[in-house]
Amino acid sequence: MLIKTLRKKRDEGVGHWFILVLLALAQFMVVLDVSIVNVALPSIQKAFNMTADNLQWIVTAYSLAFGGFLLLGGRAADLFGRKKIFLIGVAGFTFASFLTGVSTSGLMIVMARILQGFFGAFMSPAALSIVLVIYKEGKDRNVALSVWGAVAASGAAVGVLLGGILTQYLDWRWNFFINVPVGILVVLTAYFILPKHQGESKQRGFDVIGAVLVTGGLMALVYALVKAPNEGWTSSLALTYFAISIVSLTLFVINESRSKHPILPLKIFKIRNIVGADLSQLALAAGLFSVFFFLTLYMQDILNYSPVRTGFNFLIIPVTIGVVAANVPKIIAKIGFKPVLVIAPLFVSTGLFVLSHVRVNGTFWHDVAPGMIIFALGLGATFVSITIAATSGVSKQESGLSSGLLTTAQQIGGAIGLAILTGVVTSSSTHYLKTHLSAAMPKPTPELMDAASVHGIQRGFLLASTFGILASLISLIVIKPVKVDPNQKPPVATH
């Protein structure tokens, strides 16, 4: 009876908000899985006696597959049907989550995480492209994308909390098992209520060479960025994979300019707002990933908070983002998204600058909360506006592609930023130790170690604060203002 009612409402052009909640829930699973595993890593390490080098592959494997296949997933949604690709992505992601939870070795976890990232790369852009088709440009799309942006921006914070609770009170395996019932619910519901879509493109030819080149190039780039801080930026390993990435992506661009059915039509970059939004997203993500990584270390290692308390503290971010995201569409309807994209990233930078003053003997409310709140104010407004800018003026035939590009920019930006900032934090901490050791104190005391760690984190946040300024400048120079019609009527789903 419920399914019939939902189908009827879908056919009548209503019930879009229920569909939005469903799609946002799927996106939430993808974003959540990036951060939820971090809290469980110590428990996984003990369970399988993994070395630190092998342990980091649990995070790296997911990032590699997810970042590498995003463009392929977005284009597949356009060519073969958004609903079909979305259902395949969710089902595969759910199954891979189950495999990760029942893993009996470190190697099995890593392989399952690769599957998670692969299917997530198809699920995420397909979901966003469905949103873009159901909601036409204007008031309703802006509201829908504000929900989407809030989910994307706050999922990492919720992941830290949820990961802490599940790891501390249940078992690390539940960090992955939790996706199973949610995924099954999404698949069953989406099958019945999502509008059908057979693929916008009349030309079903698939650019296999382009798919291989872009996927290989992006995976090589992410791998090089992940390994460079430990191996060295000029190490043979890092330089080799950077070279592979450059060659692959260069050949990809050449191939796309000649292919009859390109996986990435280069003409899409003639839309200035797509270029500006993706570059801004890349810069912001470079600073975003550092917040959750370094603040988790600071609160647990320096302030000695438990995983659960650390997670609860992070809730300030999604709560603030939720409040901001709910009101941003009203502002955009009056002034457009460009002014927001110029001003909001400066709040992100200000928040990161405030966090660069954390102390060894600090407290959450004095040292962390103020920066978090300012950071979240800017992030909530920026993510919503960037998503609107990156998808405005895009045809239905390329909605999946534009979605994949935006998410790719976020993943690559996050990997670049985290790699650079991790190197800065490590080198700053090491330098601090060297300058404070002497013949009278040849070995560092626990207090000195904490001071060195905090010094490194301060330098990391200080550098991260410049990324928001860069995003603001990009928006100022590249983004074109677009008038928004606040009175546009809700659309009817016909695809």
Image: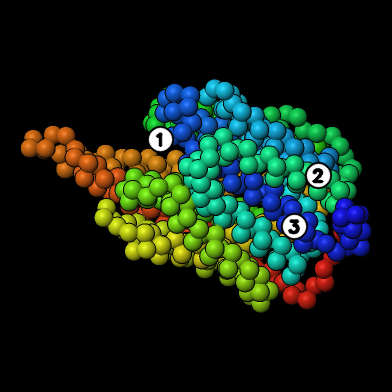
Q: Position of residue 261 (x, y in %)?
A: 80, 37
Q: Earlier in the sequence, mark 3 or mark 1?
A: 3
How packed mark 3 is, by other alpha carbons closer than 10 Å (few <14, some 14-19, many 20 or more), is many
Dot 2 falls on a residue whose secondary structure is helix
Pick the residue in front: 490 or 322. Answer: 322
Query: Looking at the picture, how far across and down is residue 468, in whole percent?
Result: 48, 58
Q: Is residue 348 above or below residue 306?
A: below
- Identify residue type, mark 1: Pro
**Looking at the picture, how far across and down is residue 24, in whole percent?**
69, 53
Circle 1 residue? 229
- Give left or right: position of 407 versus 377: right
User: Badge 1 local density, few (<14 within 10 Å), some, or many (20+)?
Assistant: many
Residue type at mark 2 is Leu
Indicate which disc, 2 or 3, sits on the residue closer to the N terminus. Answer: 3
Please name the residue shown 40% across and 47% down the image: 306
Gap in angstroms between the C-alphas marked 2 and 1: 43 Å
Residue 110 as seen in the image, left or right of residue 292: right
Q: Nearer the viewer, mark 2 or mark 3?
A: 2
Q: Residue at x 45, y 57 (%)?
A: 313
Q: Which residue is mark 2?
A: 188
Which residue sits at x=54%, y=22%?
105
Secondary structure beneath dot 3 equals helix
Q: State the residue position of label 3.
A: 20
- Residues at marks 2 and 3, CA–CA distance in whole angstroms: 15 Å
- Against 239, is 471 above or below? below
- Residue 201 in view in this figure: no
Amino acid type, mark 3: Leu
